[in-house]
Amino acid sequence: MLQERPYQIKIEPDPSGERRFRWTIWEGELIRLEEAFSYATRREAIAAAEKVMLRLAKDPRARK
């Protein structure tokens, strides 16, 4: 049986920096966590968000 992932990652350009990116982790339609810092590349932002998402999957009470 397949289990749907409860968390989703959204990568967006940082409003204060033209070529920087921030991530947000969503749980359903609610924002679970947002990154306060920006990353130089989209790839760095995705890698950081995936690490946090894995920790959340192991322990839903975890914060970053």
Image: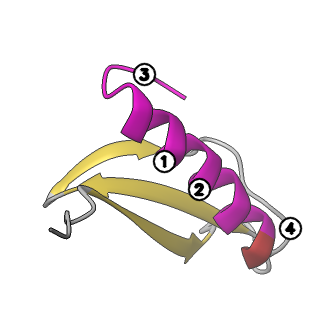
Residue type at mark 2: give it.
Glu
| First of labels 1, 3 by sequence position | 1
Nearest the eye: 26 or 5: 5
Residue type at mark 3: give it.
Ala
The answer to which quarter of the image holds residue 6 is: bottom left
Q: Nearer the viewer, mark 3 or mark 4?
A: 3
Q: Is residue 23 left or right of residue 17?
A: left
Q: Residues within 10 Å of mark 3 (few under 14, many from 20)?
A: few
Q: CA distance from mark 4 to mark 1?
A: 20 Å
Q: CA distance from mark 3 to mark 2?
A: 14 Å
What residue is pinned by disc 4?
A: 40
Residue at image point 77% right, 74% down: 43
Q: Is residue 44 left or right of residue 27?
A: right
Q: CA distance from mark 2 to mark 4?
A: 16 Å
The answer to which quarter of the image holds residue 12 is: bottom right
Residue 16 seen anywhere in this rendered image of the structure = no
Residue at image point 73% right, 76% down: 42
Magenta region, residue range: 44-64
Label of residue 45 in the image: none
Q: Is residue 11 magenta?
A: no
Q: Is residue 47 magenta?
A: yes
Q: CA distance from mark 1 to mark 3?
A: 10 Å
What residue is pinned by disc 2?
A: 50
Q: Residues within 10 Å of mark 2 (few under 14, many from 20)?
A: some
What residue is pinned by disc 1?
A: 53
The answer to which quarter of the image holds residue 1 is: bottom left
Q: Label 1 near label 2: C-beta < 8 Å?
A: yes
Nearest the eye: 13 or 15: 13
What residue is pinned by disc 3?
A: 62
| First of labels 3, 4 by sequence position | 4
Q: Secondary structure at mark 2?
A: helix
Q: Residue furthest right?
A: 40
